[in-house]
Image: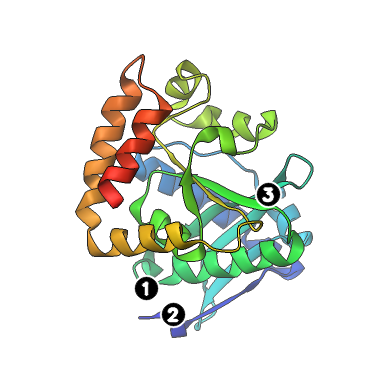
Amino acid sequence: MNTNDFIVQVALPEHRVFAEEICNEMAESAKARGTGIAKRTPDYVASKIDEGKAVIAFHKDGSWAGFCYIETWSHGQFVANSGLIVSPPYRKAGLAHAIKKEIFELSRTLYPKAKIFGLTTGLAVMKINSDLGYEPVTYSELTQDEDFWKGCQSCVNFEILKSKERKNCMCTAMLYNPAEKKHEAAKVFAEELQKKPKLYERFMRIKQRLVLKPKSGLKSLLILVTLLFR
């Protein structure tokens, strides 16, 4: 199975019927990973579809295969591509990358001047983001919109985020800034992740120890990223 077996497109109003299935799979996936997500209702997902701010994927047999949607923060200055999910039977076929690429391009079309960001603990998502031009950043470079951070309340690591005064947590922050014409750092980061995937595991183990230390700082984490991926 490969990406040629799927249709990835901007979601249309008639795709609202998949909203409940999408939400259920998001919740089950988060439970399996042992993490939390910003919980969304079928009505919320349906509203994103109606607004033309979502991408949906189908297998060539017509079954639902994946989904992602756009959220905006700080009056449109920041955009997040949220809720990426691939139906279990279609994972490891490159579909997540195809969906992320489509939603990224849609975001650039709808909000050409916005910074696109994400928080992730997953190697696969970090690789995809890096391929698209995202670069690891500190939390201070993300939106400070309170509504965005409220979405972290359902995550198992929320107490850590609070204890760090929202300056750090287990997730890695990544940002695409359209004002920066070159994204060489992101390219190098993506190449290193591809060549040395075990470095990511080491990075996460060390990061977890640093984050859990009361006095660990952002500078230490940035040095860690530099040392591991240079």
Residue holding disc 3 = 71
Per the model, the C-alpha gap separating discs 1 and 2 is 6 Å
Whole-angstrom CA distance, mark 3 to mark 2, is: 25 Å
**C-alpha separation, residue under disc 1 versus residue under disc 3:** 26 Å
Structure colour scheme: rainbow
Label number found at residue 3? 2
Q: What SS does tag 2 mark? A: helix
Q: Which residue is mark 1?
A: 93
Asked whether 75 or 7 is in front, the reply is 75
User: Quadrant where the N terminus lies?
Assistant: bottom left
Q: Residue at x 21, y 43 (%)?
A: 202
Q: Amino acid at mark 3?
A: Glu
Query: Looking at the image, which is closer to me, 133 or 106?
Result: 133
Residue 196 spot, x, y in % from top left: 22, 59
User: Label 1 is placed on what type of residue?
Assistant: Ala
- Mark 3 packing: few (<14 Cα in 10 Å), some, or many (20+)? some
Q: Are marks 1 and 2 in contact (CB under 8 Å)?
A: yes
- State the SS at label 1: loop
